[in-house]
Amino acid sequence: MASMRCFLRSGKNAVSVVLRREIHRTSPASLQVTVRDALNQAMDEELERDDKVYLLGEEVAQYDGAYKVSRGLWKKYGDKRIIDTPITEMGFTGIAVGSAMAGLRPICEFMTFNFSMQAIDQVINSAAKTNYMSAGLQSVPIVFRGPNGSSAGVAAQHSQCFAAWYAHCPGLKVVSPWNAEDAKGLLKSAIRDDNPVVFLENELMYGVAFEMSEEQLSKDYLVPIGKAKVERQGTHISLVAHSRMVSHCLDAAAVLAKEGIECEVINLRTIRPLDIETIEASVMKTNHLVTVEGGWPQFGVGAEICASIMEGPAFNYLDAPAARVTGVDIPMPYAKILEDNSVPQIKDIIFTVKKTLNV
């Protein structure tokens, strides 16, 4: 009986500790916000704040957007500021870039970044290079946004990551948000930026809800472009990722923690300019590095990070070669089992971490 009372008492204490932790972790003013709603709030607030901001793209107005990211904006701001376009990326992207040169601040939505290939001349040759070619006299304040990366069941032509494609080009800023805070704060910063910004969202993250504080929900909250964030502190190895792969890294870190391996997880947030200082500081602490991305391995984001670490002061702190976890070097298959084996899974991150640590 005494042992039963002891068990009940310990169980009660455990519950109270969990409740205290939960109350401590969750601010009363915080809310669960999906990535989709965070993006919508960011555009709504910036459209309200600045009359020069407008949104154009396929089905963004009356249909509320293919992924409902622009829900309600057409009813609130009308045809002049929320503009449905024909299915002609080269055309409406050129209109958007020209209007940016004339002083407006367009948000140019691609239904998916796979379709941005139709307009890449406008993005690279017109938007990215004009400021340099005009000796700084002509700015192009434009945001190119839409879903990027592998989706589910849409095969090779609709499932690929363009982070490395656009980050290769000087004159562009390239942003890749993970959670709702990133999505809202970075999109607001991108809209206010005087440079062309490629804003890479992820279709599979749109419906995922994250906790946002009262501060993060405020209209004045911005996430600076070019600054990474340490999402989890660790001492044994650094995991560096962007977009949806941050979730995978955090899940892998939780599993590895049960085995005594503490991973530091870095959310890049911005691909260009790359916050190499945050990565270097982490590597100098953990002495090990694994990069994780959904894109192809050759000339990818992870390759650039590994090269930058090798060329910088953090190289001398590495106790093992840096490793990469990437998508497989093939066009995306349609069959689900092949698709699952073509993109990084949590088990792949765990395997690579253990291999790097030689455990």
Image (spheres, rainbow, N blue to C red):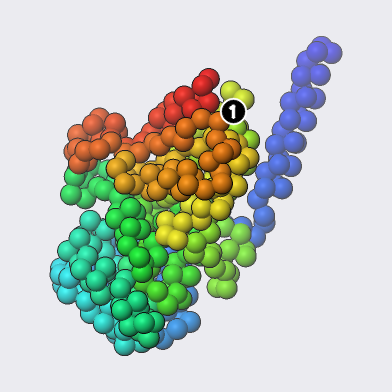
Looking at the rendered structure, the number of numbered marks drawn on it comes to 1
Quarter location, residue 256: top right
In the depicted structure, whether residue 132 falls above or below residue 325: below
The one nearer the camera, 250 or 229, is: 229
In the depicted structure, whether residue 115 falls above or below residue 331: below
In the rendered image, which residue does mark 1 sit on? Answer: 261
Residue 213 point in image, percent of width and height: 61, 59
Whether residue 208 is visible, yes or no, is: no
Q: Residue furthest right?
A: 2
Q: How crowded is mark 1: few (under 14 residues within 10 Å), some or many (20 or more)?
A: some
Query: What residue appears at the point 53 percent right and 59 percent down from the top-left corner?
Result: 227
Horizontally, residue 31 falls left or right of residue 173, namely right
Horizontally, residue 173 falls left or right of residue 33, namely left
Whether residue 329 is visible, yes or no, is: yes
For label 1, the SS is loop
Residue 312 point in image, percent of width and height: 52, 48
Query: What residue appears at the point 19 percent right and 45 percent down from the top-left corner?
Result: 156
Q: Which amino acid does label 1 sit on?
A: Ile
In the depicted structure, whether residue 93 falls above or below residue 226: below
Quarter location, residue 190: bottom left
The one nearer the camera, 204 or 102, is: 102
**Which corner quadrant holds the N terminus?**
top right
Residue 285 point in image, percent of width and height: 63, 40
Query: What residue appears at the point 53 percent right and 26 percent down from the top-left corner?
Result: 357
Query: What residue appears at the point 45 percent right and 81 percent down from the top-left corner?
Result: 48
Residue 140 point in image, percent of width and height: 35, 78
Horizontally, residue 95 falls left or right of residue 300, namely left
